[in-house]
Image (cartoon, rainbow, N blue to C red):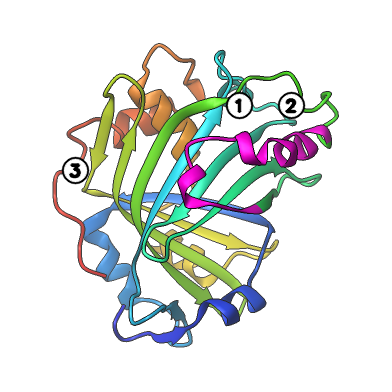
């Protein structure tokens, strides 16, 4: 990572905002990350802010008491949605985000600046959430009771891929916390995600050449299923069995 040229946040956002995009996610041992970085296109750049190239993220996810957001995803419903606050811990910035599915299967992310002190509640942004959910044609979220159901924490590095004007992220130090003290840490696992238009990036092709293929995984849904095995999880059963067992990888994440 130290060998890559830097890119600042303003330029990254301007050149690869990708609020509507196609996401491909890959799970691989954290120990393989240095080898992946060594194979990157020489023009690849890495997000750098104040000399830092890895950043702490905290996301709080919200759902109804009967977990409608989770169940819509588990059963692959077209009008599924995801609600979370995302805090960029190192810069003390926070956003409220609602993610929905686009008309052609891509992900559409709607964002609202949020106060970090409100990251655990939807109250200040409830009107925003309801307005987005109303576009799904299900009557909106009015009347639905939302509460925080899961918190995720991890360390993220973000790559800019100029040939496709796209991004890739590498997440390490993965941790999930649910209610009643439930907690899962997977230090031996890395999640690599490419965020592109319709064209696959060279990071996708690099991963394919090493035998890695996109997998069905959601930090929210798969993480919640790992902490609550009574939930329907057929969509992620193989991923859970292979990667999300508490002892699935115990090595500390590499320095990237």
- Residue 224 lies left or right of residue 141; in this view the side is left
Q: Residue at x 37, y 18 (%)?
A: 228
Q: Earlier in the sequence, mark 2 or mark 1?
A: 1
Task: Kindly tell me whether residue 218 is visible in this rendering.
Answer: no
Marker disc for residue 69: 1
What percent of the width, then of the height, locates residue 256? 27, 70
Dot 1 alpha-carbon crowd within 10 angstroms: few under 14, some 14 to 19, many 20 or more: many
Q: Is residue 84 magenta?
A: no
- Which label sits in the foreground, 2 or 1? 2
Q: Secondary structure at mark 2?
A: loop
Q: How many marks?
A: 3
**Is most of the magenta stretch helix, strand or loop?**
helix
Q: CA distance from mark 2 to mark 1?
A: 11 Å
Q: Is residue 55 above or below residue 211?
A: below
Q: Is residue 206 above or below residue 126?
A: below
Q: Secondary structure at mark 3?
A: loop
Q: CA distance from mark 1 to mark 3?
A: 29 Å
- Residue 175 lies left or right of residue 23; in this view the side is left
Q: Residue at x 74, y 31 (%)?
A: 78
Dot 3 alpha-carbon crowd within 10 angstroms: few under 14, some 14 to 19, many 20 or more: some
What percent of the width, then of the height, locates residue 112? 66, 52
Marker disc for residue 141: 2
Q: Earlier in the sequence, mark 3 or mark 2?
A: 2
Instruction: Give the extent of the magenta segment.
Output: 112-134
What percent of the width, then of the height, locates residue 16? 63, 72
Q: Earlier in the sequence, mark 1 or mark 3?
A: 1
Q: Is residue 129 magenta?
A: yes
Q: Nearer the viewer, residue 55 or 95?
A: 95
Q: Is residue 199 above or below residue 51?
A: above
Residue at image mark 3: 249
């Amino acid at each position: 990572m130290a060998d890559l040229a830097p890119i600042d946040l303003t330029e990254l956002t301007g050149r690869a905002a990708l609020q509507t995009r196609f996401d491909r996610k890959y799970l691989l041992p954290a120990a393989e990350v240095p080898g992946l970085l060594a194979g990157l296109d020489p023009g690849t750049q890495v997000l750098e802010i104040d000399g830092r190239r890895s950043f702490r993220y905290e996301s709080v996810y919200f759902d109804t008491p009967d977990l409608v957001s989770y169940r819509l995803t588990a059963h692959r419903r077209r009008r599924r949605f995801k609600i979370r606050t995302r805090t960029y811990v190192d810069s003390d910035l926070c956003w409220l985000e609602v993610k929905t599915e686009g008309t052609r299967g891509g992900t559409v992310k709607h964002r609202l600046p949020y106060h970090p002190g409100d990251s655990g509640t939807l109250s200040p942004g409830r009107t925003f959430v309801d307005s987005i959910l109303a576009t799904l044609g299900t009557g909106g979220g009015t009347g639905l009771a939302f509460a925080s159901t899961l918190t995720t924490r991890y360390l993220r590095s973000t790559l800019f891929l100029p040939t496709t004007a796209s991004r890739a992220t590498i997440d390490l130090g993965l941790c999930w916390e649910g209610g009643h003290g439930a907690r899962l840490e997977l230090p031996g696992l890395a999640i690599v995600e490419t965020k592109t238009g319709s064209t696959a990036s060279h990071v996708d092709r690099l991963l394919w050449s090493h035998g890695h293929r996109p997998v069905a995984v959601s930090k929210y849904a798969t993480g919640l299923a790992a902490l609550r095995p009574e939930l329907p999880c057929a969509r992620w059963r193989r991923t859970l069995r292979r990667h999300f067992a508490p002892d699935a990888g115990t090595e500390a994440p590499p320095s990237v």
